[in-house]
Image (cartoon, rainbow, N blue to C red):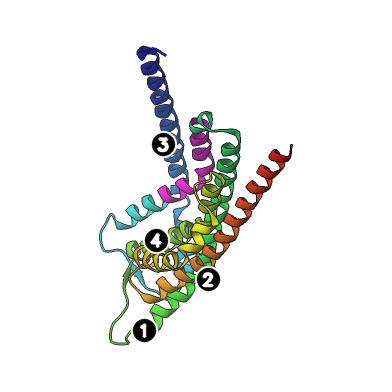
Amino acid sequence: MKPSQKTGTLVEHLAELRKRLIIILAVNLAGALICYEYMAGLIQLFISLNPGMNLVYISPSELFMVYVKLALICAVVICFPISALQIWLFISKGLLKKEQFYVLISFFFGLAFFLAGALFCYYVVLPIILQFFSRIALEEIAPMVSIESYVSFCTTMLLSFGAAFELPVAVFLLSGLELLKPATLRRWHGVCILLIFIIAAIVTPPDVVSQVLLAVPMTGLLELSIAVCWLVDRHKQRKRSTSVLR
């Protein structure tokens, strides 16, 4: 292949990447504009987690910025299927058929596991944490939490749990692409658990309750990930044995 052909191919790839990124950006911005109209109802869902909390905003633009941030986060989550499709259309041409299968499955289950983590956090973890904080309040000190800090706390927890629940999906993808083996996970099992608690301490607010409530499910997800890795590896070994016999 001539150098000019290589340059042309690179330019074509960059042009397609630019096209996909523009579509993703346009769709997410449009989604954010639509989501903005429903942010009052979403904030009410956050408030319902702890209705006794007295929320305030301490600057004229604070509530507006909360609406904007929430709208952007919601747009990214809601528009993920379209964003994933654009990413898929860009990378699929460079993947083998078996690699395409594992990436497609990972896209689908990635969204499902993220939503499962966020729902688990909303219905189980956040009520426990907010009640815990409410119980340790002093009578002499009136709690006046700003809406920005309250919503940021809730969204950080939701996103952290959603991301944590992606662990089995990530292991499935790496195992399918033969980048990870069950023996590796078993050998580094203790280190992985230590890393889980360190990551939980970093991504959650600085309190022990939040860290434990994230680290414990992640430890269970680690065990599930090891089982997933073993199943994928066993399936691949069977396919290899079948192909050899043929």
Q: Amino acid at mark 1?
A: Ile
In the image, residue 221 lies at what x, y percent? 53, 63
Q: Amino acid at mark 4?
A: Thr
Q: Could you tell me how far apart the alpha carbons at marks 3 and 4 are, in whole angstroms?
A: 22 Å
In the image, residue 44 lies at what x, y percent? 47, 63
Q: Is residue 195 magenta?
A: no
Q: Is residue 200 left or right of residue 186?
A: left
Q: Is residue 209 above or below residue 148?
A: below
Of the two numbered discs 2 and 1 on the same chain, state the one appearing first in sequence.
Answer: 2
Disc 4 residue crowd, few under 14, some 14–19, many 20+, Cα 10 Å: some
Q: Is residue 76 magenta?
A: yes
Can residue 67 be seen here? yes
The residue where tag 1 is placed is 136
Which mark, by number, is residue 124?
A: 2
The residue closer to the viewer here, 231 or 125, is 231
Of the two numbered discs 3 and 2 on the same chain, state the one appearing first in sequence.
Answer: 3
Q: Main secondary structure of the magenta part?
A: helix
The secondary element bearing badge 4 is classed as helix
Q: Quadrant of residue 40?
A: bottom left
Q: Quadrant of residue 96?
A: top right
Of the two numbered discs 1 and 3 on the same chain, state the one appearing first in sequence.
Answer: 3
